[in-house]
């Protein structure tokens, strides 16, 4: 029997607007992001758990607005004039809590972006008041930012995300795999990524590819399997 061969082709993550699936669990956040020319004070904080689609939506916004995207911890004082010359998205702002140099750089960037009449999108897992920013002036400015929340995915969105993750890895699972995963895995985008990556590895050399049995084993291997789950 011929075995499935696997080539070392990197996963291609699709981050365009057409790849962002909209359901009631993220429609409000998307609506707020799309109204960026009318953001109060020219800024918005996009918050949600890791893997909830913040980076995807940030790329959509950057594409629409012509903005740059940079991780908060990568900003330096030298970057500020260039970054402030247009819209900018700052990712994972809470990661710089307590980092005096990074907080100071973000403070100056925030002020200059808005002074230049541009817009700023900030992403984090929690609301600005929980970021732990120690620079008082920056904390004050962040706390006054409008918040858009990405919530726990519903069945439709989780199914779409799993399908996208499989497609990014050029995997076509058996038809019953995604419904099975949606029923039994934790409702988390981060877990979805872990499960698909695990299945990508485990499917190597199996002639049937990704089956429900393989999916069940993957959930068990990753300790996400509910004891009541069955084939």
Image (spheres, rainbow, N blue to C red):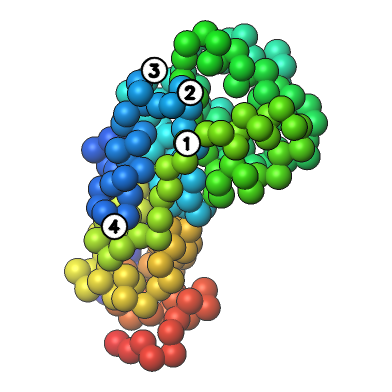
Name the residue tied to disc 3: 66
Any part of residue 2 in sight: no
Up-down relation of residue 70 to residue 155 (above or below) = above
In this view, the mark in front (2 or 3)? 2
* Residue at disc 2, secondary structure: helix
In this view, the mark in front (4 or 2)? 2
Give the residue at x 23% y 69%. Answer: 174
Q: Nearer the viewer, residue 161 or 57?
A: 57
Is label 1 in contact with label 2 (beta carbons under 8 Å)?
yes
Check disc 1: other Cα within 10 Å, few if <14, some if 14-19, many if 20+: some
**Marked residue nearer the N-terminal end (4 or 3):** 3
Give the residue at x 40% y 55%. Answer: 151
**Marked residue nearer the N-terminal end (4 or 2):** 2
Give the residue at x 48% y 76%. Answer: 224
Residue 179 located left or right of residue 219: left
Residue 13 located left or right of residue 160: right
Name the residue tied to disc 4: 157
Name the residue tied to disc 1: 146
**Mark 4 and mark 1: span between their CA atoms?**
24 Å
**Mark 4 and mark 3: span between their CA atoms?**
27 Å
**Marked residue nearer the N-terminal end (1 or 3):** 3
Location of residue 154 in the rendering, given as x and y in whole percent from the top left corner = 31, 63
The N terminus lies in quadrant: bottom left
Check disc 3: other Cα within 10 Å, few if <14, some if 14-19, many if 20+: few
In this view, the mark in front (4 or 1)? 1
Location of residue 136 in the rendering, given as x and y in whole percent from the top left corner = 75, 32
Q: Which residue of the protein is positioned furthest toward the left in this rendering? A: 175
């Amino acid at each position: 029997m011929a075995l499935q061969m696997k080539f070392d082709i990197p996963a291609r993550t699709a981050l365009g607007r057409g790849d962002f699936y909209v359901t009631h669990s993220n429609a409000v956040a998307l609506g707020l992001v799309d109204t960026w020319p009318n953001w109060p004070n020219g800024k918005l904080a996009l918050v949600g758990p890791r893997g909830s689609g913040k980076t995807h939506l940030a790329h959509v916004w950057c594409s629409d607005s012509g903005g740059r995207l940079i991780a908060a911890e990568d900003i330096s004082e030298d970057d500020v004039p260039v970054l402030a010359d247009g819209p900018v998205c700052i990712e994972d702002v809470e990661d710089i809590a307590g980092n005096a140099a990074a907080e100071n750089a973000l403070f100056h960037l925030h002020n200059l972006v808005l002074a230049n009449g541009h817009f700023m999108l900030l992403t984090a897992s929690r609301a600005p008041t929980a970021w732990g920013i120690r620079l008082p002036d920056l904390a004050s400015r962040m706390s006054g930012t409008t918040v858009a929340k990405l919530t726990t995915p519903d069945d439709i969105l989780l199914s779409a995300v799993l399908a996208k993750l499989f497609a990014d890895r050029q995997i076509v699972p058996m038809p019953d795999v995604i419904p099975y995963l949606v029923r039994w895995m934790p409702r988390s985008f981060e877990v979805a990524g872990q499960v698909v990556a695990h299945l990508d590895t485990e499917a190597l050399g199996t002639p049937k590819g990704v089956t429900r049995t393989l999916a069940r084993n993957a959930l068990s291997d990753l300790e996400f399997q509910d004891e009541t789950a069955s084939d």
